Image (cartoon, rainbow, N blue to C red):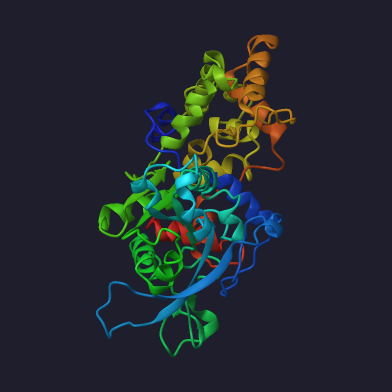
Amino acid sequence: MKKLTPLLLALFHPANALPTHRRIPDILKSIKEQKLQEDLTPPAQFAQEDTSIDEFNTDIETLYFDQRLDHFSNEGENDDIFQQRYFYTSRYVHDNDWNNNSNNNADATDDATTATTLAFICVGGEGPSLTTSVLLDSNHCTGDMIALAERLFHKGVDVHLFAIEHRFYGESFPQNNNGYYLRGSDDEDESDLDVDFSHLSSRQAVKDVISFVQSPDAAQKTSSSSNASSSEVRWITFGGSYPGMLSAWCHLLHPNVIFAAVSSSSPLQAQLDNYGYNDIVNGDLGDGSVGGSEECQRIFREGHEEVVATMEGENDDEAEDDGEDGLDRVAALFNVCDGGDALRASRRNQETFVGNGLFYVPAQSNDPACEGELCNIEKICKAMTDQKESTPGISSMEILATLKKHNDYGCTNVNWQAYLNYLKTPTNSNANDRSWMVSVEMV
């Protein structure tokens, strides 16, 4: 058997970036559970943010503006437009009464600062489609953008808050007079045509932001600032992961339009085998401040190495006694759907199984106060080290398998081709997955 790439061992290389993590086996599992049907009509709204706090969003407006479908076509070639959704609040813009009395405000800074008008724009593009909660409390831009706006507001700065929905997400899905743009020839039956995603790209998305910032719609909103003496509105983009890439590119490519950019955990140096996220997971398992330890990290690393060795036939003594090969043994230990045959079917299946990590570690969502048995890094590490101490002779691979079975329901799907088919077929349940993957030119 050809050696597996150091795809497991790459878990322990220096970190590059921290993209939002969604394991392929988890996606495949959700496909099976939902029994997805092919549907060529992309949803108007898919996986919206939690709207349970909408009753507090009374100051946030939901608005639309005319966005050009193709920013790179020559004038007259493709002048199609679509309605792109955005959100706005003047919550952190002072009224005229405050401005007139600012000299008596103890928190106000010098005149140069109080004359500044800022516009923060949260860039969409990953995770749930946007709702008004994006400018109040969401997983998009809450921590940095909104907190900073509030802080600056109390120092006398006017901050307009915007959020722009990524094209082909939520209600910003381009349509023409006949419905969604379809790809194919005019003589084909419409039911056999796929939705046309040719205008879904990060390049178009960057231009969307710039076009919006320069639009009359944006100018009308920012002109309401109480700092009438301000001669310039400084636009600052915010985003994390893929939207963080867009945020950075907006400033890099258009510094005359975007004054600054905040780009969090953004894999700007994209690569085919982007193992940077797993480096972070590995680091957390050895970090005592979040409940990790060197022993926990060692067991996790050693378990992956043992799986690779077993799959490659280097640890076959026990397997031969049982009449099974290494792939069968690993599949049985980790409850792989269709057993060793699934791993044997293709190298990609093996890489899907191993490269996504044998056991899920909540590096991003680690909650020290959670109540589940294996719900955070501290509890996971304690379970691993306890089992190592209490069961002499147990292998690290077997420890990981035990923990995985404890935390999982059903078998682990490692079918790489099924994952590709999922991304290739527009459905109500994969709209945003497709948009994110296609827009960063991964598919």
Residue 123 seen in the current view: no
Q: Where residue 441 sits in the image (x, y, percent)?
A: 37, 58
Q: Where residue 113 sits in the image (x, y, percent)?
A: 37, 46
Which residue occupies 34% across, 83% down? 79
So how many labels did they put on this image? 0
Which residue extends farthest bottom? 187
Camera-side residue: 160 or 338? 160
Q: Is residue 330 above or below residue 336?
A: above
Q: Is residue 180 above or below residue 352?
A: below
Which quadrant of the rendered structure holds the C terminus? bottom left
Which residue occupies 67% across, 55% down? 50
Q: Is residue 266 above or below residue 2?
A: below
Camera-side residue: 170 or 312? 170
Q: Where residue 80 sits in the image (x, y, percent)?
A: 38, 82
Which quadrant of the rendered structure holds the N terminus? top left
The image quadrant that residue 271 belongs to is: top left
Residue 194 seen in the current view: yes
362 to the left or right of 94:
right
Camera-side residue: 72 or 429? 72
Which residue occupies 26% across, 55% down? 255
Q: Where residue 316 sits in the image (x, y, percent)?
A: 53, 23
